[in-house]
Amino acid sequence: MFDLQNYLKRPDALSMDQAYEIYSQLPFDQAKTDNDFHELWQDVIDAALAYVPIRVNWNEQTHEQRAAIDTKRTSNHNSFIATLSALNRFTMNHYDIPNWLAELGDPATNRKRIGDFAGYVVLFGVLQGR
């Protein structure tokens, strides 16, 4: 069973408050009519929706099942990171927003934390859709 308190003690943990703080920096209100922003954001959502189910199912899979899907998991994770990077560059250049992606850490060393953010992106989207 998952233990949230143990997870939050990890040095690479990403709490919901931290994830929401990063998410809240995105210029959703300012960019209401910005098609480029919305396309980039849709890319982030699509990449998160491709990656998160693999992460969720990972816990229930056998070693063999994991090995069979590991390349796809890594590819989807890389795609999510790439979409975040593109959106981060865009928001920094067009909305003078600080480097919010840096708060998740370096993609080379903080892949798990960035992957956790994918789950929060999906969660926030689900809650927003209520």
Image (cartoon, helix red, strand yellow):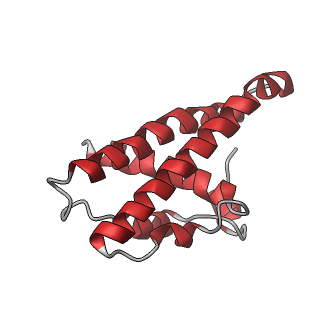
- Figure quadrant of residue 70: top right
In the displayed image of the protein, which residue is found farthest to the front?
93
* Residue located at (67% from left, 48% from top): 2
* Residue located at (59% from left, 57% from top): 114
Q: Position of residue 10 (x, y in %)?
A: 72, 67
In the displayed image of the protein, which residue is found farthest to the right?
63
- Judged left or right of residue 91, residue 11 is right
Where 75 falls versus 14 (above or below)?
above
* Residue located at (51% from left, 66% from top): 101
Q: Position of residue 58 (x, y in %)?
A: 70, 34
Where 63 falls versus 91 (above or below)?
above
Q: Position of residue 75 (x, y in %)?
A: 65, 37
- Judged left or right of residue 101, residue 78 is right
Q: Is residue 117 visible?
A: yes
Q: Nearer the viewer, residue 33 or 26?
A: 33
Q: Is residue 24 visible?
A: no
* Residue located at (70% from left, 44% from top): 1
Q: Report how many numbered discs are placed on residues in the image.
A: 0
Q: Position of residue 120 (x, y in %)?
A: 47, 52
